[in-house]
Amino acid sequence: MFLSLVIPVYNEEESLQELIRQIEEVCAQNHYEKEVIFVDDGSSDTSWEIISSLAAEKSYIHAVRFRRNFGKAAALEAGFSRAKGEFVMTMDADLQDDPAEIPNFLSKMSEGYDVVSGWKKVRHDPWHKVYPSRLFNKMVSSLTGVTLHDHNCGMKCYRAQVLKEVAIYGERHRFIPVLAGARGFRVTEVVIQHRARKFGVSKYGFSRFLKGFLDLLSVKLATTYGQRPLHVMGGAAVVMWLFAALLFLLNILISVTFTSFHSFFNTCTHTISYFCGYFGMMLMACGITAELITAFYQQGMKHSQTNFSIQEIIRDPEPTDSSPSVMK
Ligand code: UDP
Ligand code: MG
């Protein structure tokens, strides 16, 4: 069994050496063959220098450095395309995820699951992160049918095949289990110990939840209506037409019954139906079309043209072929 650990790094200089020490400890205890792929997502501290010196000492460490900060999803994507392992695990670089949990993920995988997502049952994060996150998790689970308590957990394990088939972009890294579940892969979760951040600061604020909500909408559309956008647009159009027809009938009724009210009502119905109908339909049609074009475009361009730019690489295992193939 060969394990790839993909670790996105953005200004985590104080944590990296200790992280590697803990990874080595758990892998030695369990006799795992491993590679660690650090992706430095444009750090402005000494993270890259530390990663470089670790890679110089240890041949199982690979490292990719982005030219600037492209975001965690891009960092994971760069790591995934280089991972050679049968199982690919992601974990944060800030020591909040405990490498001692790795065996729990792998034992779940051995039960036949394709994706195992961590569940930080007891979270050591501020309340303004914890509560919105709970609400977000409930929403994602009920909308997508992939029920997890902690969709946003940085510690996840994938069978390599999953990552060949699922395209991530924007901040959709949180939704890999959802996207995998939509393709029929078996997804589950495992409770993990979470640790408080000891060094550095969190890279995310409240805006994550807004972006997360928009990404959820995008994922929901791509997984349910990706192949049939007309079901959404046609449905919306029918609702609009029904609304317009209702106003039209009301208009006739009022003009016949209350002649004095006639011209005022006409103006109202005309204005309301014009603005609601026209702008609603235009926005809906444009938004959905744009979303779907993006989803298809990204799926098609996976790896052939990435949306990040690499500045430096240490001991690069060539990116693997991303084309979907049949799972044995
Ligand atoms: N990270 C990254 N690029 C970014 C933001 C974060 O690579 O633009 C990394 C970060 O270094 C860490 C992981 O993603 O290893 C999770 O970030 P953070 O700990 O800030 O998130 P939180 O735990 O607060 O949700
Ligand atoms: Mg963290």
Image (cartoon, helix red, strand yellow):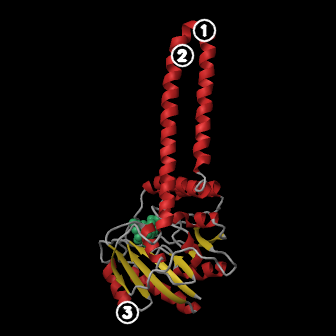
**Label 1 Cα neighbours within 10 Å, binned few <14 / some 14-19 / many ≥20:** few
Closer to us: mark 3 or mark 1?
1
Mark 3 in CB contact with mark 1 (< 8 angstroms): no
Mark 1 in CB contact with mark 2 (< 8 angstroms): yes
- Residue carrying label 1: 258
Q: Quadrant of ligand 2?
A: bottom left
Any atom of ligand 1 within 8 Å of the CB at mark 2?
no
Given residues 24 and 172, the one toward you in this image is 172
Q: Secondary structure at mark 3?
A: helix
Q: Secondary structure at mark 2?
A: helix
Q: Position of residue 214 (x, y in %)?
A: 50, 52
Residue at left offset 45%, top offset 77% = 79
Residue at left offset 60%, top offset 22% = 248
Mark 2 in CB contact with mark 3 (< 8 angstroms): no
Classify residue 17 by image quadrant: bottom left
Is residue 101 rendered to the left or right of residue 36?
Answer: right
Q: Secondary structure at mark 1?
A: loop
Q: Amino acid at mark 2?
A: Phe
Question: Which is more N-terminal, label 3 or label 2?
Answer: 3
Q: Position of residue 22 (x, y in %)?
A: 48, 85
- Residue carrying label 2: 265
Classify residue 117 by image quadrant: bottom right
Residue 222 visible from this viewpoint: yes
In the rendered image, which quarter contains the N terminus?
bottom right
Residue at left offset 55%, top offset 57% = 219
- Residue carrying label 3: 57
Question: Which is more N-terminal, label 1 or label 3?
Answer: 3
**Label 2 Cα neighbours within 10 Å, binned few <14 / some 14-19 / many ≥20:** some
- Count of residue discs: 3
